[in-house]
Image (cartoon, grey):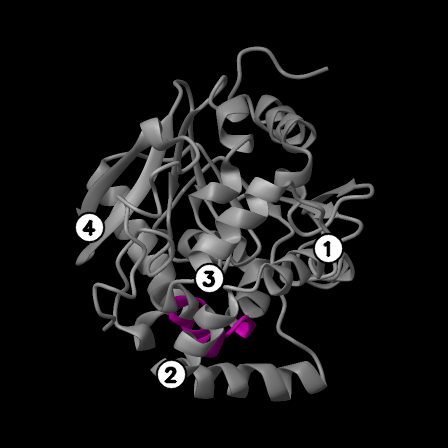
Amino acid sequence: MSSADDIPSWERDGRDWPNRDSSRFVSAAGMRWHLQEMGQGPVLLMLHGTGAATHSWRAFAPILAEHFRLIAPDLPGHGFTTPPPYHSMSLPGMAGYVAELVETLGVEPDLVLGHSAGAAILIRACLEGRLAPRGLISLNGALMPWRGLPGHVFSPAAKLFAKNSLVSRLFALRAANRKSIQRLVDSTGSTLEPFGVDLYQRLIRSPSHVRASLSMMANWDLTLIEEGLPRLETPLFLVVGEGDTTVSPREAQRVRQHLLPAAELTMLPELGHLAHEERPREVAEVVRRIAGRLGLLSVPSV
């Protein structure tokens, strides 16, 4: 487990956290979760991706809160949620933790949205019957296993790095260099405002947050999603940034062609992996249209 100094401090690092007034802390599944809740209406559960936190929804969430009761947690070990044992941060493990949080909150999400790895977690939870929403939105979802050389290199490397706490500290030290964080954000194919980059830098300065990200990568097995998708009964909506250089847009095409032909695909021209941070209103409108078609909103978009 990490020391208290490794974990982001709500008093220090969260002093100007986006949508701080909507934040609260909840104990569930043996962890202290940070989550944000806002709005009224159908329940929309949103999960961020590996290495992010609720800051990723900073402009996106308030727009959707005009139509939904929105619940967005920091995933285990990310942001201000305490870490579980790192070996448990597998896809089934994370899906189970999220399901326990939802059960503790006493809510039944009507719609779920996951960004990147968050989409895989939600799909797994639906396949296990732990969540039963009317629809599942995958926003630049990381749903398919790495192919070829990356699959043989990156996952074993992450396993090695995650086991070594010194590596997490070295990554965190590098975060002091603003240019390295800017390069990391730019590598997603997205362009963010300076404050957005600042928030990622703030998180990556935390060895605990870095180790959680590495541990998810080390324990991740997307063959579970590849094998399970043909059995998914929840309507799946694939929303994909055409300029995503983190998860290739071709992956969504593979999902539709080979695994789940009923999945619906929406392409977002000119947007990258962090599309919802680049143009939050445009992406929120896509979500609103989907919710309208599912009968969750009284006035569907036109």
Q: Nearer the viewer, mark 1 or mark 4?
A: 4
Q: In the picture provided, is 195 more to the left or to the right than 270?
A: left
Question: Mark 3 is on which residue type?
Answer: Ile
Of the numbered discs 4 and 3, the one sitting upstream in the chain is 4
**Is residue 156 at least partly visible in the picture?**
yes
Residue beneath label 1, please? 256
Q: Residue at x 61, y 55 (%)?
A: 141
Q: Secondary structure at mark 2?
A: helix
Q: Residue at x 82, y 43 (%)?
A: 270
Instruction: Give the quadrant of residue 41.
Output: top left
How many angstroms separate mark 1 from mark 3 (CA)? Answer: 34 Å
Question: Can you give x and y, in whole percent of width and height, for residue 171 in the image?
Answer: 48, 73
How many angstroms separate mark 4 from mark 2 (CA)? Answer: 29 Å
Q: Nearer the viewer, mark 1 or mark 3?
A: 3
Quadrant the N terminus occupies: bottom left
> Do the numbered discs 1 and 3 sit on residues whose CB atoms are within 8 Å?
no
Q: In the picture provided, is 27 more to the left or to the right than 38?
A: left
**Is residue 235 at least partly visible in the picture?**
no
Of the numbered discs 4 and 2, the one sitting upstream in the chain is 4
Q: Nearer the viewer, mark 1 or mark 2?
A: 2
Residue beneath label 3, please? 204
Residue beneath label 2, please? 166
Question: Mark 4 is on which residue type?
Answer: Ala
Of the numbered discs 1 and 3, the one sitting upstream in the chain is 3
Please state the extent of the stretch shown in magenta in the rendering: 211-223
